Amino acid sequence: MATKIMTLNVKGLKSPKKCHMLYKELSRLKVRVALIQETHLTRIGERLMNSQHYPNMVFAANGVHCKTGGVGLLFHRDLHVSCEKLYRDPEGRWLIWVGKLNGLLMTIVNIYAPNTHQGPFFRELTSSIIQYQQGPLVVGGDFNLTYNPVYDNSTGRSLGTRIDRRNMRVFWDTLNVVDMWRVQHITNRDYTFYSKCTAIFFKN
């Protein structure tokens, strides 16, 4: 049976009501592994997160007191989860989880990329993934950049810098990863984010 994996920028999880809404929606969609970004949780706040449906959670926070950024992994109770290694970015930009899901050794990487100066970020992350990866690799998150500007934003034009797009492509190519949704929907336009300041829809 396939394991449904979902990535979602939650724009903050500081209220119990929003956390409850997140768990409820993930359950409704039958998500088994959720990669969430922009948790805005401190290391203390992470400890207060709990769900009967997603009892196994791991997070990377931006320091002890800073309430910006942050990423997390949520595993459904139906999965047999065994975490063997966990690597966290101290600024809460990425999380590398190495472990077993239902007996399969694999690596899951959750990313919340910066808006600017992405070159150093992707180079450092690439080196870390190559160093720590075991088994099949799953990469997800918010890259703050569209991989294919022709189809991945509502203008059909390139919006990021050429250098940033090249850095992201090198990251994907080096790790030999692909956008599975795009592979199955080659020319479809469907978006995950709307920017009010630019009035543009994006697929991140």
Image (spheres, rainbow, N blue to C red):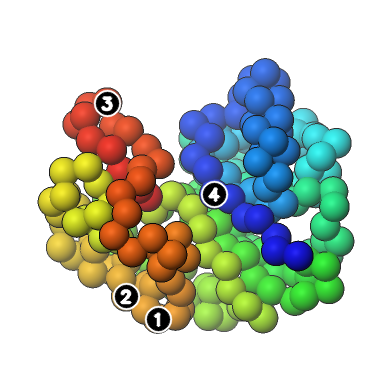
For disc 1, the marked residue is 174
**Label 4 with label 3: CB-CB less than 8 Å:** no
The residue positioned 67% from the left and 81% from the top of the image is: 135
Decide: is 102 above or below 5: below
Residue ID at (23%, 35%):
200
Q: Residues within 10 Å of mark 4 (few under 14, many from 20)?
A: some
Mark 3 sits on what residue? 196
Circle number at residue 170: 2
Q: Quadrant of the N terminus?
A: bottom right
Query: Counting residues from the N terminus, which is met first, the one under dot 3 or under dot 1?
Result: 1
Amino acid type of the residue tagged 1 in the rendering:
Thr
Mark 2 or mark 4, which is nearer the start of the sequence?
4
| Three-letter code for the amino acid on which mark 4 is drawn | Thr
- Sequence-wise, the earlier of marks 1 and 4 is 4
Tell me which numbered mark, 2 or 3, is placed earlier along the sequence. Answer: 2
Q: Nearer the viewer, residue 8 or 183?
A: 183
Residue picked out by circle 4: 7
Report how far apart the C-alphas of labels 1 and 2 lie in the structure. 6 Å
* Count of residue discs: 4
Q: For the residues marked 2 and 3, what is the alpha-carbon distance in whole angstroms?
A: 30 Å
In the rendered image of this protein, does residue 98 appear above or below residue 71? below
Residue 8 relative to residue 28: left or right: left
Distance from label 4 to label 2 (Cα)? Answer: 21 Å
Q: Amino acid at mark 2?
A: Val
Instruction: Kindly report the distance in space between the C-alpha atoms of the residues bearing marks 3 and 1.
Output: 34 Å
Q: Earlier in the sequence, mark 4 or mark 3?
A: 4
Amino acid at pointer 3: Lys
* The quadrant where residue 161 appears: bottom left
